[in-house]
Image (spheres, helix red, strand yellow):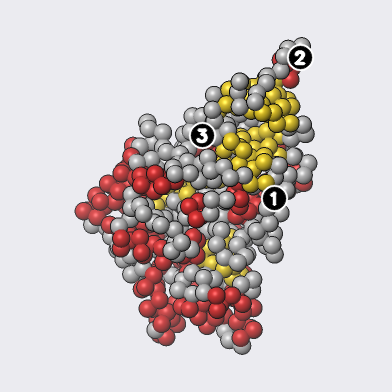
Amino acid sequence: MEELVIRDADVVDGSGADSYRADVVVDGGRIVSIVKEAAAAGCQRPRARRELDAEGLVLSPGFIDMHAHSDLALLRDPDHSAKLAQGVTLEVVGQDGLSYAPVDDRTLAEVRRAITGWNGYGDDVDLDWRTVGEYLDRLDRGIAVNAAYMVPQGTVRAMAVGWEDRPATGAELDRMRRLVAEGLEQGAVGLSSGLTYTPGMYADDAELTELCRVVAVYGGYYCPHHRSYGAGALEAYAEMVELTRKAGCPLHLAHATMNFGVNEGRAPELLALLDRALDAGADITLDSYPYTPGCTTLAALLPSWAGEGGPEGILTRLADPATAERVRHDLEVTGSDGCHGVPVEWDTIEISGVTAPALADHVGRTVRESADARGEDPWTTARRLLVEDRLGTTILQHVGHEENVRAIMRHRAHTGGSDGILRGAKPHPRAYGTFPRYLGHYVREAGVLTLEECVAHLTARPAARLRLPDRGLVREGYRADLVLFDPDTVASGATFAEPRVLPAGIPYVLVDGRLAIEDGRRTDVLAGRAVRRTPV
């Protein structure tokens, strides 16, 4: 007898088709049969050792978070309710060009410092891997949700070139090609870049094109955080479209949005650009989170020249008054490339987390508010935070536009990604609320998407981008990564004031056919594993 029958569910299967009522039988981690209500009339209904009454609930595939920063959280926090409670059953990590494999000892130390604000320093995790394959093997010991991995281009460049702003030599480019190929051979699904983060931003288009050609050979995709989401944003999007066209490589645009005052109301221009490329045969998808503010580290706003030499180089420059004044001028007057070419507005920069306990009173205030409380100018406060927190400060940037968010989420190539940073006293609520916010606010309350459309965006469409042949749909033979939610009550509990509140209306989540969330509570199941690239 099979393990579980989910009885009387309203199935929204991920395809975009209308829902239907059915009993769904799960065994051995897979969906073994689906008996629709009409077919069951007058027949004996399927039985199993356990029955779950799904009356009034929607059954859908588990949600796929196409842009996550849980690289260490998956290992640090076996509970991982921040994602599981949202119905997420697969995360794509290794994002924005900076992560922890492949590395050598030097690069690992540098990367840990550079992205402390994203993942913590990692001194509470045994970083006992160096290659992509070893990291994926570590995930295979058991994690809360499944995880796929992107080879991080910035980390690769740090290994081969260092943190210098210069073109790679021929030998260095060859080494980067080998590192990308090895990562893909070991199971990575593609290549990510952070082209407003050092050292990845030091790569020119020719270098990136060569790496994307390697990705194309292995059937992966390129996921850039491109060079600007502010001034020149459309040109930056067009650059990525053209680069991947030349490389013959699929493109997935990370946290696609149009931010800052210069881009208010301009999402239709972006979507027209993408539609022209799609109609010409390009393979393009994108992800977005359903909020207007962004989130990054305070150090990420600095100009690229200040990042040469890595984290220690930044701190050395900030310690020098003359050089720090150059940084301030780039930030406040010129508009640094780290701040997307837009002069920083300190009253839009909210401090969301610090690593040094002595700085905790800054959290929840904008940089300007913190500066006013101390009777100093905002740059003095920002500089002090950067130095005393050793670049570990995270921030929210209140620079987005609701009309852009809504327009982009309607697009035919759209998928969902939280871009969730789980560190800090007041993280962005997208880390805990992205997927229920799509279903509750944008489907039920605002009607921006139908339920069937939204589920397709969060399940089948990302599974197709990842080339996963047995995930993303409720189909017989498919993996039983499933979520049951109440369409009338599902909602994000996380707010900017209380960002770690778990969502409502998602009582059951199955990973590999096992209940990881049951009656709204986390079980002790650790059924997640690394999801490796499907060989071409």
State the separation of the CA atoms marked 3 and 2: 34 Å
Circle nearer the N terminus (3, 1):
3
Seen as rendered, the residue at the extreme bottom is 375
Q: Which residue is mark 3?
A: 464
Circle nearer the N terminus (3, 2):
2
Seen as rendered, the residue at the extreme left is 171
Q: Which residue is mark 1?
A: 503
Q: Give percent across and percent down for residue 443.
A: 72, 43
Q: Callout 1: 10 Å neighbours few (<14), some, many (20+)?
A: many
Q: Pointers 3 and 1 in contact (CB under 8 A)? A: no
> Against 175, is 87 above or below?
above
Q: Pointers 3 and 2 in contact (CB under 8 A)? A: no
SS at circle 3: helix
**Looking at numbered disc 3 in the image, what kind of residue is underneath it?**
Ala
Q: Which disc, if any, is residue 41?
A: 2
Say which residue appears at 63% left-offset and 50% top-offset.
Answer: 434
Disc number lying in front (3 or 1): 1
Disc number lying in front (3 or 2): 2
